């Protein structure tokens, strides 16, 4: 295992910002994860696990510890019956190549999460989701290195406490577990309509009436290509904010002033309000703040156009948060994690 020194984090995060990591290394087996962690702990060095860097923002001061780049490979079928196939995937696999392989196997469950950047191991951390699916729906369990107990543990779905873009890995147990593989149980059934609104509209517009996993995947790729900037060309981290969640009484107030406000019923007395809509209504869509552009096709996305560092992003973020709070009395939250 090679250890590199003073590595610019901007080269390893899709927002292309931030200072240096004091040390960086790559791991390709679970044993390498444990060995690297023990070594870092012995030297009192903080550890940060990096996947594709597509949901991580690096600060200007950099990271005074060791960044471990997760590269563990693997894709294997571990169970198969009449209705489902269960696969185990290494944390370092590229998420979208996993989706493609399952679609090629005619399995359902993650096809709507096509073209999401990042690695398989990062997917449960923020409970990735798109077009009506989230990884919490198919994740059976995962294996992680428990840095507190110094052993490998299998965590079942319910232990991960998944909710909208949330899990124990970025809340109560942040920093404790290093995910090394994930196990997904996928269905052999064809995808069944009705689909998520944007997908349904796409199928109607394109006169599509037969639905396979591949048709869903291609539709999602087409929709995403039109709405989301390619991080390889325009530095961004996908949705920069979470969608807002409001209580029913708040929604009643909002509807009185904004009868057209789009909402999504969460079924528990709460409603999701698209933050992209809130930012657009606040007049910021397409605007450039401190070198950060509010994407003109989806105001939820910030593009690093000419920011000189994390401080520019933080200033732009705070101005957007304040503008939304002033107009709607809703406190929106950043979605990507920070190193
Ligand atoms: N909208 C606006 N203006 C905007 C953006 C959106 O009015 O600038 C409205 C749309 O018209 C629509 C609603 O907001 O009524 C929702 O928009 P959309 O379906 O495009 O989804 P989103 O809320 O912007 C979420 C996820 C995406 C995911 C899509 C599709 C979050 C934070 N984002 O975005 O995930 O791909 O739904 O399911 O939940 C990501 O997390 O990085 C990500 C891209």
Image (spheres, rainbow, N blue to C red):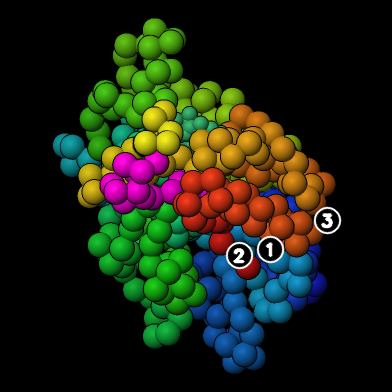
Percent x, y for residue 6? 80, 72
Q: Choose the circle earlier in sequence order: 2 or 1.
A: 1
Would residue 136 appear left or right of 25 to someone viewing this image?
left
Location of residue 205 with respect to 324 vertically, above or below: above
Q: In 3D space, how far apart are the residues under numbered discs 1 and 3 (Cα atoms)?
A: 13 Å
Q: Dividing the picture into quarters, in which one does residue 300 lie? A: top right
What residue would you read off at disc 1?
58
Q: Is residue 15 visible?
A: yes
Q: Residue at x 31, y 14 (%)?
A: 210
* Mark 3 element type: loop
Image quarter of residue 24: bottom right
Say which element carries label 1.
Answer: loop
Give the residue drawn at x 40%, y 24%.
199
Front one among 76 and 291: 291
Q: Report the residue marked by disc 3.
A: 308
Q: Residues within 10 Å of mark 3 (few under 14, many from 20)?
A: some
Which of the pair 182/306 is nearer the observer? 306
**Picture quarter containing residue 177?**
bottom left
- Residue in the picture at 49% in, 46% down: 328
Q: Which range of residues does the magenta coloring cover?
A: 241-255
Task: Say whether disc 3 or disc 2 marks the residue closer to the N-terminus.
Answer: 3
The reply to whether dot 3 and dot 2 touch (C-beta < 8 Å) is no
């Amino acid at each position: 295992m090679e250890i590199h020194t003073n590595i610019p984090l901007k080269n390893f995060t899709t927002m292309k910002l931030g200072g240096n990591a004091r040390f960086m290394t790559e791991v390709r087996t679970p044993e390498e994860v444990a060995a690297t962690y023990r070594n870092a702990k012995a030297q009192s060095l903080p550890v940060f696990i990096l996947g594709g860097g597509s949901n991580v923002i690096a600060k200007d001061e950099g990271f005074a510890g060791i960044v471990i780049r997760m590269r563990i490979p693997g894709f294997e079928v571990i169970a198969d019956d009449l209705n489902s196939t269960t696969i185990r995937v290494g944390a370092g696999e590229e998420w979208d190549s996993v989706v493609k392989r399952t679609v090629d196997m005619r399995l359902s469950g993650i096809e709507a999460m096509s073209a999401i950047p990042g690695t398989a191991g990062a997917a449960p951390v923020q409970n990735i989701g798109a077009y009506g699916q989230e990884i919490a729906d198919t994740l059976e369990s995962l294996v992680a290195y428990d840095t507190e107990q110094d052993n490998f543990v299998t965590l079942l779905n319910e232990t991960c406490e998944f909710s909208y873009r949330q899990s124990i890995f970025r809340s109560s147990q942040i920093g404790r577990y290093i995910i090394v593989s994930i196990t997904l149980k996928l269905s052999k059934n064809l995808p069944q309509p009705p689909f998520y609104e944007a997908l349904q509209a796409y199928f109607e517009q394109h006169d599509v009436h037969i639905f396979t996993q591949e048709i869903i995947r291609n539709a999602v790729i087409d929709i995403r290509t039109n709405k989301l900037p390619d991080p390889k060309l325009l530095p961004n981290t996908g949705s920069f904010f979470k969608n807002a969640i409001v209580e029913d009484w708040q929604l009643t107030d909002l509807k009185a002033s904004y009868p057209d406000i789009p909402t999504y019923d969460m079924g528990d007395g709460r409603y999701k309000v698209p933050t992209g809509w809130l930012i657009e209504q606040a007049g910021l869509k397409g605007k450039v703040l401190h070198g950060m552009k509010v994407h003109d096709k989806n105001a939820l996305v910030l593009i690093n156009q000419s920011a000189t560092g994390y401080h520019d992003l933080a200033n732009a973020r705070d101005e957007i948060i304040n503008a939304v709070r002033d107009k709607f009395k809703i406190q929106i939250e950043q979605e990507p994690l920070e190193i």
